Amino acid sequence: MKDLDYETLDEDARGILRQNDRGGFTIPTSGLYPFQWNWDSVFAAWGFSTFDLPRAWAEIEALFEGQLPSGMVPHIIFRKDDSDYFPGPGVWGCDLGAFSSSGITQPPVAATFIRKLYEQDPALGRPILETLVPKLYAWHQWFMDWRCSDDGAIFVTHPWESGRDNSPDWDSSMAALEPGDVGPYTRRDTSHVDPSMRPTKAEYDRYLYLVQRGRKLGWDDAAMAEAPEFQVAEPGISFILLRANRDLAALCDAVGRDASDVNAWTARIETGCKTLWNDEIGGYDAVNLLTGARSGALSSVAFLCWYAGMPDARMQAPLTRVLSDVAFPVPSLVPQDARFDSLRYWRGPTWGFVNSMIGLGLAESGLTSEAETLRQRTAEVIRKGGFAEYFDPITGAPAGGDSFTWTAAIWLAWVRAGSEG
Ligand code: DGY
């Protein structure tokens, strides 16, 4: 393993952002993910903001060029096709916006990081904000219309919508799907990355089945909401939207727009997030809304309660446990869970960008020593393993794609922001 010094890593991180820049938008990594992904792009902007604020704003503006007329911002924007990726634009068949795109969204981190860009230089950001706030508002409104449960928790309609593709949070919903014959297809991800670090074939059949279903329904929100086959309320997207909504209210204030609707959404989602608490695991977990089954999985996104502005003393014990028992926290699934798999994507590995959100929330809630521990352990795993997509939480081994945009971005914007190194 390497043990690189901070200045070399700073330069490497900036180099990765430049190298993954495709001319105004940034891909997560070449080969494995050759398009613009929604939350990856927002983290790219946060990284760019440490050395090129105008470029950071351009990233966000490019993302919103892909917004659909419904207000939804898709999880992938296919500006041009690339045969290195499956399923590409021809499989999704979603051409409702200015670019071909996927037909689902991703956790809405944008408002939170747009606020950070704006606060760095309000004079520069102000005119851009004037055009972005209505777009953010439309996206959040879309969430409230199409992804908010009766209880106020936010749900996903495809595992990819959560960004945590193979988390155990979807196991019961995935098992209930009957994909039948989805037709022949060739995965491309396993030609870029060791298959043991990726979702299984059974999972891919189901991912594809849900894509085919959406395509048949013309990606029409109302049609897809009838007789849904996959609906899981989950803490990641719920906490992220809750936080983003608070930031959207502040952005509305900044441009003189009334925020009363946004504040009402905040209250509703906050109520919903409370329903995701599960006494049996002593943490927040996902609920299959079609059956009421709980996932029983304590994953890293449960630790976003502080980031969401919902400090919860009950989460202190699990936090102390992951910080003391796991060498490179925070694991995407706690190692005590029988489903833990240290290298398989969202069933165990540690993701630096999730750590950055957890760390921001801890620091804002006054848990400064925990925030600092997390920041230092994230620094250590990157110094040893480089800018990998994710890391084995036990050994720190790098995993998934390399030269990864969001790992480089959070190195610059979060790990280094409070560092003496
Ligand atoms: C993939 O292709 O692995 C992505 O996670 C889908 O967004």
Image (spheres, rainbow, N blue to C red):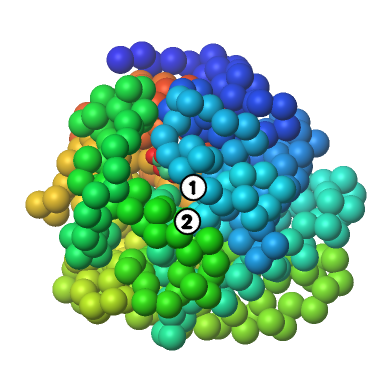
Real-space Cα separation, disc 2 to disc 1, in angstroms: 6 Å
User: Is the residue marked by circle 2 packed among few (<14), some (14-19), or many (20+) residues within 10 Å?
Assistant: some
Q: Are marks 2 and 1 in contact (CB under 8 Å)?
A: yes
| Residue name at image x 28 percent, y 71 percent | 288
Q: Position of residue 343 (x, y in %)?
A: 23, 34
Circle 2: residue type: Arg
Q: Position of residue 244 (x, y in %)?
A: 59, 63
Above/below status of 359 relative to 149: above
| Residue name at image x 32 percent, y 36 percent | 185
Above/below status of 399 relative to 284: above
Image quadrant in which you'd find residue 384: top left
Circle 1: residue type: Trp
User: Is the residue marked by circle 1 packed among few (<14), some (14-19), or many (20+) residues within 10 Å?
Assistant: many
Which dot marks residue 215?
2
Q: Is residue 421 left or right of residue 229?
A: right
Q: Position of residue 142 (x, y in %)?
A: 60, 70
Which dot marks residue 134?
none
- Mark earlier in primary sequence (2, 1): 1
Where disc 1 sits, the SS reads helix
Which dot marks residue 92?
1
Is residue 199 among what the camera can see? yes
Q: Is residue 53 left or right of residue 207?
A: right
Is residue 154 among what the camera can see? no
Q: Position of residue 52 (x, y in %)?
A: 75, 31
State the residue in front, 80 or 174.
Answer: 80
- Ligand 1, seen in the image, is in the quarter at top left
Q: Quadrant of the N terminus?
A: top left
Where disc 2 sits, the SS reads helix
